[in-house]
Image (cartoon, grey):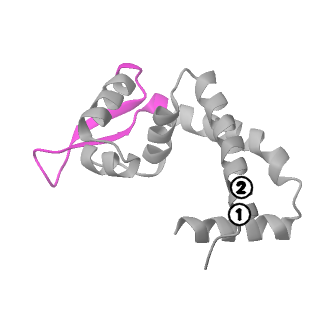
Amino acid sequence: MDADPEALDRLVQTSFTVMAVLSQAAAAHDLSLTQLRVLAILRDHEPKIAELAAYLGLDRSSVSGLIDRAVKRDLVLRTASEDDARAVRVSLSPAGHRLAPTLTAEIGDALTPLTSKLSPAEQKKLGALLTKLLD
C-alpha cells in the first residue's frame, strides 16, 4: 500500500517543528542535538558504548568523543562493565540526573501548545499512532 502524500508531508512538517523545539532546548543548555539524544537515552538506560552507538546510529569512535565531552561537562559517568571487562558502561552523573528532568520539562512545555489543540482522546490516539509508527 502506498503512503498518502499528504500524511507524509504532515509527518515531515511535524518532525521539523519538533526538531526546532529540541534544537532550542539543547542550545539553551549548550548541547548539540546528539548530546541531547545521549542524555535522553541515558535517562532510562546504562548502555555500553557499543550499545549507545547502535542506539544513535553512529560509530563507536564518534560516540566516544561525545562521551568524552559529556564527561568533561560532568553530565555523564563511565564505569567498567560488570559482565565484560573490556567494555565501558555510560550513565548520567548526578549533574546529568538533575539536568534531564529540566530538559524534559522545557521540551514538554514547548510542545504542549501543539498537543493542546487536540482533545484528550485525540492526544491518546496520537500517542498510539506514533507508537505504532516507531515500533
- Identify which amino acid the numbered label 1 is placed on: Pro
Side (left or right) of 50 relative to 52: left
Q: Are marks 1 and 2 in contact (CB under 8 Å)?
A: yes
Does 80 appear in magenta? yes
Residue depicted at 66% across the width and 29% down the height = 24
How far from the left and from the top, in percent, is residue 123?
79, 64
Q: Secondary structure at mark 2?
A: helix
How far from the left and from the top, in percent, is residue 65?
30, 28
Q: Nearer the viewer, residue 108 or 78?
A: 108
Q: Secondary structure at mark 1?
A: helix
Q: Which mark is residue 95?
A: none
| Residue to which mark 2 is pinned | 9
Q: Residue 118 appears in which quarter of the rendering?
A: bottom right
Does 38 appear in magenta? no
Residue depicted at 62% across the width and 35% down the height = 103
| Residue to which mark 1 is pinned | 5
How far from the left and from the top, in percent, is residue 38?
44, 39
Q: Is residue 133 above or below residue 73?
A: below
- Identify which amino acid the numbered label 2 is placed on: Asp
Q: Is residue 39 above or below residue 48?
A: above
**Magenta extent:** 72-96
Q: Nearer the viewer, residue 94 or 113?
A: 113
